[in-house]
Image: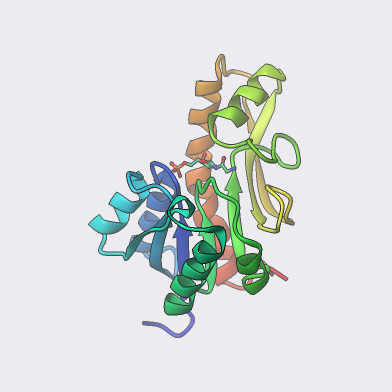
Amino acid sequence: MKLNELTLAVFASGRGSNLQAIINSIEAHELDCRICFVLSNNSDSGALEIAREKNIPAIHLSEKKFFAETFEISLLKVLEDYRPDLIVLAGYMKLIPKVVIEKYRNRILNIHPALLPKFGGKGMYGMTVHKSVFESKEKYSGVSVHLVNENYDEGKILYQEKIDISDCNSPEEIATKVLKVEHTVYPKVLKLICDNKLNLN
Ligand code: GAR
């Protein structure tokens, strides 16, 4: 293991295509990072399956099985065990507990499939975002990577890419176009952080 290698904990709830994009970038030696574990609230998530295939510790931790406090303790214990440099939310649909935010202040990133601060906030995730963008007849959407604070999608924006969606005729077409860009954005942002070209503080 190299000394300057960044360790990442990736949290994901769904299919895990952003996780896969990060793994691809690491395997192609474009990104000097190591994923120390993948965590999901969803035992059936594609993300956990991808992690198992790659021999990355795959952890299912659902708050449904715990009282709020014991869930937080379990999550802190996992973080204490692996001590990641960064927590990378890649389609993780749950709010991060306050104690974790405090402990990992400015070290938790999220990717959002729109141009924040528009189309963000509680309930705004996945296709709901693209449906709202479509209904608002926006000509542009995009991808945002931001720091995570106590509120959904409100932390400091670190990076954005704007996407022309004027040729899209449905929310699904927007989703496809945006996701393709997402897969380039997370590796790009992580590389900027690795190369000390993006300061999280
Ligand atoms: C991605 O589009 C990501 O931006 C979005 O969930 C999808 C996960 O896809 N996240 C949010 O909407 C967060 N508010 P993936 O599981 O294939 O990476």
Q: How many marks?
A: 0
Residue 51 position, x and y percent, is: 31, 57
Quadrant where the N terminus sits is: bottom left
Question: As rendered, which of 43 and 84 lies closer to the eye?
Answer: 43
Q: Is residue 196 above or below residue 2?
A: above
Residue 65 position, x and y percent, is: 43, 54
What colour scheme governs how the chains and residues are painted in the rendered image of this protein? Answer: rainbow
Seen at 70% across and 34% down, the residue is 119
Q: Is residue 97 above or below residue 80?
A: above
Residue 91 position, x and y percent, is: 50, 46
Seen at 68% across and 48% down, the residue is 152
Q: Quadrant of residue 189?
A: bottom right
Residue 185 position, x and y percent, is: 55, 49
Say left or right for 45 vs 141: left
Furthest residue in direction top, as rendered: 169
Say left or right for 16 vs 165: left
Question: As rendered, which of 18 and 94 lies closer to the eye?
Answer: 94
Q: Is residue 173 above or below residue 59?
A: above
Can residue 107 be seen at all in this image of the molecule?
no
Seen at 54% across and 68% down, the residue is 86
Can residue 114 be seen at all in this image of the molecule?
yes
Furthest residue in direction bottom, as rendered: 3
Q: Quadrant of residue 72?
A: bottom right
Furthest residue in direction front, as rendered: 67
Q: Is residue 6 above or below residue 175?
A: below
Quadrant where the C terminus sits is: bottom right
Seen at 48% across and 29% down, the residue is 176
